[in-house]
Amino acid sequence: VSARSGGAEDIEPAELTTDLTVSVVGALTCVRAVLPSMRHAGVGTILMTGGGIVMRPPAHALSLAAGKAALRALSLSLADELRPAGIR
Protein backbone atom coordinates (compact mmCIF):
# COMPACT_ATOMS: atom_id res chain seq x y z
CA VAL A 1 0.00 0.00 0.00
CA SER A 2 1.39 3.38 -0.92
CA ALA A 3 -0.21 5.96 1.36
CA ARG A 4 0.19 9.59 0.44
CA SER A 5 2.74 11.73 2.26
CA GLY A 6 1.63 14.89 3.90
CA GLY A 7 0.22 16.53 6.95
CA ALA A 8 -3.21 17.83 7.84
CA GLU A 9 -3.05 20.68 5.34
CA ASP A 10 -1.78 18.48 2.50
CA ILE A 11 -4.12 15.48 2.54
CA GLU A 12 -7.58 15.86 1.09
CA PRO A 13 -10.31 14.05 3.06
CA ALA A 14 -11.16 11.94 0.01
CA GLU A 15 -7.53 10.82 -0.27
CA LEU A 16 -7.46 9.84 3.39
CA THR A 17 -10.70 7.93 2.94
CA THR A 18 -9.20 6.01 0.03
CA ASP A 19 -6.03 5.18 1.98
CA LEU A 20 -8.01 4.00 5.01
CA THR A 21 -10.26 1.90 2.81
CA VAL A 22 -7.28 0.20 1.17
CA SER A 23 -5.54 -0.44 4.50
CA VAL A 24 -8.44 -1.52 6.68
CA VAL A 25 -11.12 -2.82 4.33
CA GLY A 26 -8.43 -4.54 2.28
CA ALA A 27 -7.12 -6.35 5.35
CA LEU A 28 -10.62 -7.32 6.48
CA THR A 29 -11.40 -8.67 3.01
CA CYS A 30 -8.31 -10.90 3.19
CA VAL A 31 -9.18 -12.08 6.70
CA ARG A 32 -12.72 -12.95 5.63
CA ALA A 33 -11.33 -14.99 2.73
CA VAL A 34 -9.25 -17.27 4.99
CA LEU A 35 -11.56 -17.51 8.01
CA PRO A 36 -13.77 -20.37 6.78
CA SER A 37 -10.82 -22.72 6.27
CA MET A 38 -9.20 -21.66 9.55
CA ARG A 39 -12.44 -22.19 11.46
CA HIS A 40 -12.84 -25.60 9.82
CA ALA A 41 -9.28 -26.55 10.79
CA GLY A 42 -9.74 -25.17 14.30
CA VAL A 43 -6.43 -23.36 14.04
CA GLY A 44 -4.81 -20.53 12.16
CA THR A 45 -2.56 -17.51 12.34
CA ILE A 46 -3.26 -14.11 10.86
CA LEU A 47 -0.29 -11.76 10.76
CA MET A 48 -0.66 -8.05 10.14
CA THR A 49 2.41 -5.84 10.00
CA GLY A 50 3.19 -2.18 10.44
CA GLY A 51 2.26 -1.53 14.05
CA GLY A 52 5.51 0.26 14.92
CA ILE A 53 4.48 3.47 13.24
CA VAL A 54 1.45 3.63 15.53
CA MET A 55 3.64 4.09 18.60
CA ARG A 56 5.61 7.01 17.16
CA PRO A 57 4.09 8.32 13.94
CA PRO A 58 6.42 10.59 11.98
CA ALA A 59 5.44 14.07 10.89
CA HIS A 60 3.87 14.33 7.46
CA ALA A 61 2.78 10.69 7.41
CA LEU A 62 -0.80 11.37 8.47
CA SER A 63 -2.42 8.98 6.02
CA LEU A 64 -0.02 6.11 6.67
CA ALA A 65 -0.13 6.55 10.46
CA ALA A 66 -3.94 6.72 10.51
CA GLY A 67 -4.22 3.60 8.36
CA LYS A 68 -1.80 1.64 10.53
CA ALA A 69 -3.57 2.74 13.72
CA ALA A 70 -6.87 1.56 12.30
CA LEU A 71 -5.24 -1.69 11.20
CA ARG A 72 -3.88 -2.22 14.73
CA ALA A 73 -7.34 -1.68 16.21
CA LEU A 74 -8.79 -4.14 13.70
CA SER A 75 -6.08 -6.68 14.59
CA LEU A 76 -6.68 -6.40 18.34
CA SER A 77 -10.43 -6.74 17.90
CA LEU A 78 -10.02 -9.76 15.61
CA ALA A 79 -7.62 -11.38 18.08
CA ASP A 80 -10.22 -11.22 20.85
CA GLU A 81 -12.99 -12.38 18.54
CA LEU A 82 -11.15 -15.30 16.96
CA ARG A 83 -9.11 -16.60 19.92
CA PRO A 84 -11.89 -18.97 21.09
CA ALA A 85 -11.86 -20.57 17.60
CA GLY A 86 -8.12 -21.35 17.88
CA ILE A 87 -7.19 -18.57 15.47
CA ARG A 88 -4.53 -16.11 16.51
Image (tube, rainbow, N blue to C red):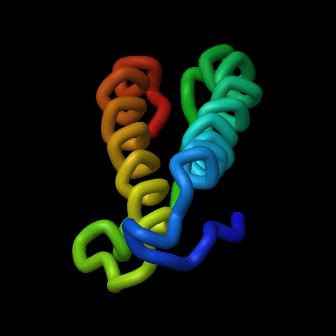
* Quadrant (top left, top right, bottom left, bottom right) of the C terminus: top left
35 relative to 30, above or below: above
Q: Position of residue 84 (x, y in %)?
A: 36, 19
Task: Please state if 72 lies on the left or on the right of 36 as rendered.
Answer: left
* Quadrant (top left, top right, bottom left, bottom right) of the N terminus: bottom right
Task: Please state if 85 lies on the left or on the right of 83 as rendered.
Answer: right
User: In this view of the protein, which residue sits in the foreground, 8 or 2?
Assistant: 8
From this viewpoint, is residue 37 visible?
yes
Farthest residue to the left: give it: 55
Res. 69 image quadrant:
bottom left
Res. 30 image quadrant:
top right
Which residue shows up at 41% across the image and 74% down it? 7
65 relative to 5, above or below: above
Which residue shows up at 45% across the image and 27% down it? 86
User: In this view of the protein, which residue sits in the foreground, 78 or 23?
Assistant: 23
User: In this view of the protein, which residue sits in the foreground, 15 or 29?
Assistant: 15
Farthest residue to the front: give it: 9
Which residue shows up at 45% across the image and 19% down it? 85
- Number of callouts: 0
Q: Position of residue 14 (x, y in %)?
A: 61, 45
Task: Please state if 28 lies on the left or on the right of 56 as rendered.
Answer: right
From this viewpoint, is residue 47 visible?
no
Task: Please state if 37 lies on the left or on the right of 64 as rendered.
Answer: right
Which residue shows up at 70% across the image and 31% down it? 29
22 relative to 63, above or below: above
